[in-house]
Image (spheres, rainbow, N blue to C red):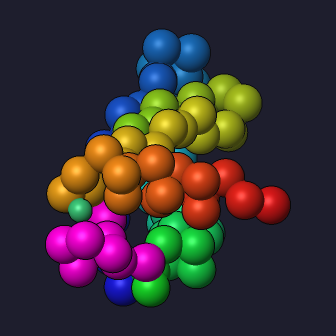
Amino acid sequence: MIQIDFNIALDDSQTADSPLFDEFELGQMLDHTKAQIIQFLQTRLGDLRCPSHDQPAKVRVDGVYNAETEQLDFNYHIDTCCQMFLMQAIKTLNQS
Ligand SMILES: [Zn+2]
């Protein structure tokens, strides 16, 4: 298991006046999306450790949720003990 932090902002510029906007629903939607991201990251990186320093990677997920399109745009920021392991973690994450 690796540490995963979420930093998600809400792009509510389109929905500020909308009475249909449901904050509870949004929370549930995000929880579902977060769970999928966590599962993906843990599957890919959960058992990965730096061969030199025996440290796991850490991941920060920066995202913006667009309430109008119901899409979450996000990027992974991988934090590692060294450059070598960072390269390995990115490679592992991008494997198909
Ligand atoms: Zn290292």
Question: Could you tell me residue 15's position as x and y percent?
Answer: 54, 22
Numbered marks: total: 0
Name the residue located 58 percent from the left edge and 80 percent from the top edge.
Answer: 43
Would residue 43 appear left or right of 46 to someone viewing this image?
right
Please identify the quarter of the rendering in which residue 54 is found: bottom left
Whether 71 is drawn above or below 40: the answer is: above
Q: Position of residue 21 (x, y in %)?
A: 56, 38
Magenta segment: does it hold 82? no
Does residue 31 appear in the picture of this structure?
Answer: yes
Magenta run includes residue 51: yes
Whether residue 52 is situated above or below residue 20 in the rendered picture: below
Q: Main secondary structure of the magenta part?
A: loop
Q: Position of residue 69 (x, y in %)?
A: 72, 30
In the image, the segment drawn in magenta is: 48-60
> In front: 63, or 25?
63
User: Image quarter for residue 71?
Assistant: top right
Query: Which residue is rendered at x = 48% and y = 72% of the image?
Result: 45
* Quarter of the rendering occupied by the N terminus: bottom left
Is there any visible trace of residue 33 in the rendered image? no
Please state the horizontal and vertical placement of residue 55, each as a whole percent of the image: 22, 74
Give the quadrant of residue 8: top left
Taking 67 as reference, is 55 left or right? left
- Farthest right residue in view: 96
Which image quadrant: the C terminus?
A: bottom right
Using the image, determine if residue 10 lies above or below residue 81: above
Which of the two residues, 19 or 88, is positioned nearer the viewer here?
Answer: 88
In the rendered view, tell whether residue 70 sits above or below residue 26.
above
Viewer-nearest residue: 54 or 34: 54
Q: Quadrant of ligand 1?
A: bottom left
